[in-house]
Image (cartoon, rainbow, N blue to C red):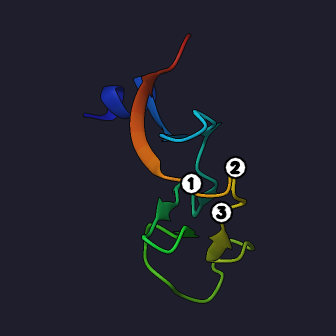
Amino acid sequence: MDNLKRDFTTVYVCNNCKATTPPPTHCGKAMELDDNLLFTCWKGQHAPCCGRESQIKYENCCENPKLEIQLSQMLS
């Protein structure tokens, strides 16, 4: 399983404008995007524990972003 995590990463792709956005990281892992387009620490909403805000607003790529998560293979 660890090899799979090293070989793949996630990105969010907008179904409207096709913009690709990698999620920010928090506590060493990718943050999760909620329905309100707010990236939240994978541990949940809590006080910053790694020196970063635990919630980050997604900067809209278009007027009506419709983001879908995708796995992409990392090149090594």
Compared with 72, 50 (above or below) is: below
Q: Nearer the viewer, residue 31 or 7?
A: 31
Quadrant into which the C terminus falls: top right
Q: Nearer the viewer, residue 70 or 45?
A: 70
Query: Which residue is under mark 2?
Result: 61
Query: Which residue is under mark 1?
Result: 65
Circle 2 — which element?
loop
Query: Which residue is under mark 3?
Result: 58
Of all residues shown, which one is farthest toward the bottom? 47
Q: Nearer the viewer, residue 44 or 59?
A: 59
Mark 1 → mark 2, Cα distance in angstroms: 6 Å
Q: Quadrant of residue 4?
A: top left
* Residue 48 image offset from top left, x and y in percent: 66, 82
* Residue 50 image offset from top left, x and y in percent: 67, 71
Crowding near the residue tagged with mark 1, few <14, some 14–19, many ≥20 C-alpha atoms within 10 Å: some
Q: Quadrant of residue 5?
A: top left
Q: Amino acid at mark 3?
A: Tyr
Circle 1 — which element?
loop
Q: For this view, does 33 lie left or right of residue 54?
A: left
Q: Amino acid at mark 2?
A: Cys
Name the residue at 47% across, 40% down: 15
